[in-house]
């Protein structure tokens, strides 16, 4: 069984479409994973997947990329704090909806909640925003919902903010309830599940780089349907929305686009 055949069989078994991902990157990751288990072929590993639901879940969770930290890419978050969120708050008086797609361990999501909490007067208007955080990985969502983080993920958080928004639990830091309660976590597959709607801000950062160009275009079309007029779409710093004008977007800052039509 070669990789192409494994992809087709795996899609039939799980519904997970490996063909949407960049082949070389994904094949390399899977081969490394299989070797660590001391399994010598796709055929042998596929037989294990067929026989074990637990292994299927473990492998699906492995396939998703979960690397993030608080306020990752400081320049992007500086623009979110100083330009994006104030503009939305000034323009829209009803509740603001933010979608963090591919939220991983929740660090990005809670970073956004901290910024909103500060901008609306330290929580004096809690109804003003809601953050929906989604990821395909069920295990990482459980971690995100706990809101418990190793200290090294907070390198970009000042000592003052750590004391204000976290409290220690053993050798980790727990996000405080006032930041956590405005966040809703949901399991979601960008390739096949229904998208959120009526969003004022969507972040999908460091996710597109793993998909083939044609898949990226399909996802963008769905994201634009989910985004309100004048809403913002934010990618990872190393990602780029090609032909963004065709999607009715205007580039405002690095990795930050606004829907202008």
Image (tube, helix red, strand yellow):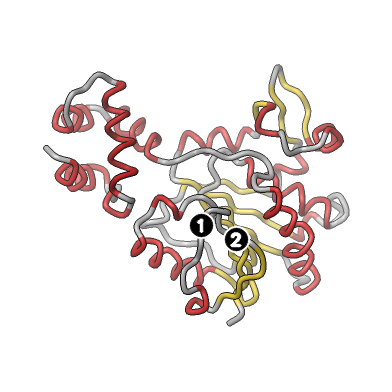
Is residue 100 toward the left or the right of residue 5 in the image?
right
Horizontal placement of 215 versus 105: left or right?
left
Please rate how many residues cluster around mark 1, counting C-alpha atoms within 10 Å: few if below 14, some from 14 to 19, many from 20.
Answer: some
- Local packing at callout 2 (Cα closer than 10 Å; few below 14, some 14-19, many 20+) is many
Residue 75 at x, y = what percent?
70, 53
Rendered residue at 40%/50% (across/down): 210
| Residue located beneath label 1 in the image | 239
Q: Nearer the viewer, residue 95 or 98?
A: 98
Q: Position of residue 148 (x, y in %)?
A: 65, 30
Instruction: Establish if 76 lies above or below 247.
Output: above
Q: Mark number for residue 254?
A: none
Q: Position of residue 33 (x, y in %)?
A: 32, 28
Q: Are marks 2 and 1 in contact (CB under 8 Å)?
A: yes
Residue furthest to the bottom in view is 261
Toward the viewer: 215 or 75?
75
Mark 2 — residue?
Answer: 255
Compared with residue 182, is residue 93 higher up or lower down, i.e. above or below? below
Query: Which residue sits at x=58%, y=40%?
Result: 68
In three-dimensional space, the C-alpha distance between marks 2 and 1, rounded to whole angstroms, equals 7 Å
Residue 184 in the figure: left or right of residue 134: right
Q: Position of residue 236 (x, y in %)?
A: 56, 53
Image quadrant where residue 14 sits? top left
| Residue at 45 percent of width and 40 percent of height | 65
Looking at the picture, tell me which residue is in the foreground, 48 or 261.
261
On screen, residue 149 above or below 9: above
Report which quarter residue 199 is drawn in: bottom right
Q: State the count of labels.
A: 2
Task: Give the residue drawn at x 65%, y 54%.
Answer: 131
Relative placement, left or right, of 213 versus 47 is right
Quadrant containing the C terminus is: bottom right
Relative to 208, does residue 200 appear above or below in the rendering? Answer: below
Name the quadrant of the N terminus.
Answer: top left
């Amino acid at each position: 069984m070669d990789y192409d055949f494994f992809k087709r069989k795996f899609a039939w078994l799980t519904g997970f479409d490996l063909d949407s991902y960049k082949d070389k990157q994904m094949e390399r990751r899977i081969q490394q994973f299989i070797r660590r288990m001391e399994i010598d072929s796709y055929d042998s590993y596929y037989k294990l997947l067929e026989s074990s639901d637990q292994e299927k879940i473990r492998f699906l969770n492995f396939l998703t990329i979960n690397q993030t930290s608080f306020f990752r890419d400081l320049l992007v978050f500086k623009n979110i704090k100083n330009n994006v969120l104030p503009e939305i708050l000034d323009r829209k008086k009803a509740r603001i909806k933010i979608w963090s797609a591919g939220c991983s361990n929740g660090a990005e999501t809670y970073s956004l909640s901290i910024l909103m909490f500060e901008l609306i007067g330290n929580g004096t208007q809690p109804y003003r925003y809601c953050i929906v955080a989604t990821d395909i990985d069920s295990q990482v969502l459980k971690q995100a919902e706990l809101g418990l983080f190793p200290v090294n993920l907070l390198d970009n958080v000042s000592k003052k903010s750590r004391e204000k928004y976290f409290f220690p639990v053993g050798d980790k830091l727990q996000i405080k309830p006032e930041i956590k309660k405005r966040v809703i976590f949901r399991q979601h597959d960008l390739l096949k599940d229904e998208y959120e709607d009526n969003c004022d801000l969507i972040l999908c950062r460091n996710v597109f780089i793993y998909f083939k160009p044609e898949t990226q275009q399909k996802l963008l079309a769905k994201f634009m349907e989910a985004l309100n007029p004048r809403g913002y779409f934010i990618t990872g710093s190393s990602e780029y929305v090609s032909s963004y004008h065709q999607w009715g977007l205007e580039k405002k800052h690095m990795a930050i686009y606004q829907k202008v039509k």
